[in-house]
Image: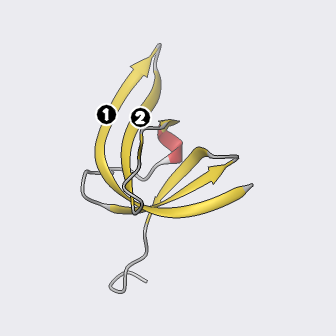
Amino acid sequence: MLGERKAIVLEVKGWDVHGVGYVDVALGFQDRSVETPRLGRESIPDDLRAGEEVLVTSAMSVVVSIRRAETETNA
């Protein structure tokens, strides 16, 4: 099942393993739940920061990508 939910970025931590970049992103959802998926850098926007509103794409309840939410000013 593929789905999309809004979230707020709580924290972003980047790290490398043998030259391959990963990012742990803490996300807060409207139902007050928190998830911290580990994603490849290609799966998130550049310069993602805490406090940003994002759209989180999940497949089978596993976060697969994060993109910035469209707002009225940038829609």
Quadrant of residue 35 within the rendered picture: top left
Rendered location of residue 61, percent (x, y): 63, 46
Quadrant of residue 31 within the rendered picture: bottom left
Q: Nearer the viewer, residue 63 or 75?
A: 63
The residue lying at 53 percent from left, 46 percent from top is 43
Colouring used for the render: secondary structure
> Which image quarter holds the N terminus?
bottom right
Q: Please, which residue is most extreme toward the top here?
A: 18
Q: Say how many tags the image has.
A: 2
Contact (CB < 8 A) between labels 2 and 1? yes
- Left or right: where 72 falls relative to 58: left
Mark 1 surroundings: few (<14), some (14-19) or many (≥20) residues within 10 A: few
Rendered location of residue 4, percent (x, y): 58, 62
Q: Nearer the viewer, residue 33 or 49?
A: 33
The residue lying at 52 percent from left, 35 percent from top is 40
58 versus 62 height, above or below: below
Q: Nearer the viewer, residue 64 or 33?
A: 33
- Left or right: where 1 falls relative to 31: right
The residue lying at 41 percent from left, 50 percent from top is 33
Q: Which residue is mark 1?
A: 13
Mark 2 surroundings: few (<14), some (14-19) or many (≥20) residues within 10 A: some
Q: Which mark, residue 23?
A: 2
Three-letter amino acid code at the position of disc 1: Lys
Q: CA distance from mark 2 to mark 1?
A: 6 Å
Q: What SS does tag 1 mark?
A: strand
Three-letter amino acid code at the position of disc 2: Val
The residue lying at 51 percent from left, 37 percent from top is 39
Q: Earlier in the sequence, mark 2 or mark 1?
A: 1
Rendered location of residue 60, percent (x, y): 70, 46
